[in-house]
Image (tube, helix red, strand yellow):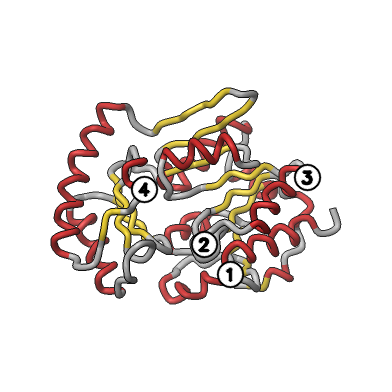
Amino acid sequence: MKNLSEFIDNKKIKIVFCDIDDTLTHNGKLPAEPYSALWTLAQNNISVIPVTGRPAGWCEMIARFWPVHSVIGENGAFYFSYQQKKMKRFWCYDQKTRNEYHDKLKKIEAQILKEVPGSATSSDQFCRLFDLAIDFKEDVEPLDTPSIQKIVDIFSDHGAQAKVSSIHVNGWFGNHNKLTTTKKFLMDEFQLNFDQAQEKICFIGDSPNDEPMFEAFIHSFAVSNIKDFSKQLIHPPSYVTPSPGGFGFVEFTQSLLKNL
């Protein structure tokens, strides 16, 4: 991983995909500085698309009220794009399939809460349409690594995907993830092929569930708290900011806008 100061190809970047938790936020809050950085990017005609594990209810608000082009939510289960006072919603699966997956996730939820002491269903679960989020750090005392792995293993035993973020283990059924929906979004909304658009796009994240994005993007970044997970990463980001969380995102923004 290179230092952010070594990034020099900033002038071609027109689209920024970014994680939210512990990438834009810091200690569980969204500080004024990274929120202002989102506005600065928008004012410089750089489109920002958060790509998050957070739920549909949150993403509706983010797409509508934040200075972003669109938002990809629940680890790629959908994207929302609010343009000219119209909300476009893309879903990976229809209602019938979502209901089937929901029933299977309820069984997994019961098993995890029984077998992993200290775990809890995330407080935003009621806003979710596609996945199950198990809290291991946000509103509970932090769980140890074996407990987190046990959560992942239970999802896997049921044939579900599971990704570890900085605060939750998110599990879901289906083949979607952050990267697959990012590629579809680029084609749908910008008419850009992902591979051919590499010089125009970048991603910044903070945790292991961002690893497919780190691997796929030529211009991949992480805030400095990624170092907490460095031993877990097979595909690390190309560049790392000096500071953690949202303050690292501000440094990333400054680097992107340097000499423009």
Secondary structure under tag 2 reads loop
SS class, disc 1: loop
Q: Which mark is residue 44?
A: 3
Depth check: give the residue in front, 172 or 214. 172
| Camera-side mark, 4 or 2 | 4
Quadrant of res 136: bottom left
Q: Residue furthest right?
A: 259
Amino acid marked by disc 1: Pro
Q: Earlier in the sequence, mark 3 or mark 1?
A: 3
Classed neighbour count for the residue bearing mark 4: other residues with Cα under 10 Å, few (<14), some (14–19), many (≥20):
some
Of the two numbered discs 4 and 1 in the rendering, the one whose residue sits closer to the viewer: 4
How many callouts does the rendering have? 4
Considering the numbered disc 4 on the image, is that residue within a helix, a strand or a loop?
loop
Residue 8: image quadrant is bottom right
**In the image, residue 115 lies at what x, y percent?**
14, 64
Query: How far across and down, in percent of the image, does residue 92 sit?
Result: 38, 34
Cβ–Cβ under 8 Å for marks 3 and 1: no
Tell me which label, 4 or 3, sits earlier in the chain.
Answer: 3
Residue at position x 66%, y 45% from top?
Answer: 15
The residues tagged by marks 4 and 3 sit, at their Cα atoms, a distance apart of: 33 Å
Q: Which label's residue is closer to the chain start, 4 or 1?
A: 4
Which residue bears the numbered disc 2? 22
Residue 237 in the image: x percent, y percent?
56, 65
Q: Which mark is residue 244?
A: 1
Measure how far apart labels 4 and 2 are at the Cα level.
17 Å
Q: Amino acid at mark 2?
A: Asp
Residue found 75% across the figure and 41% down from its top? 45
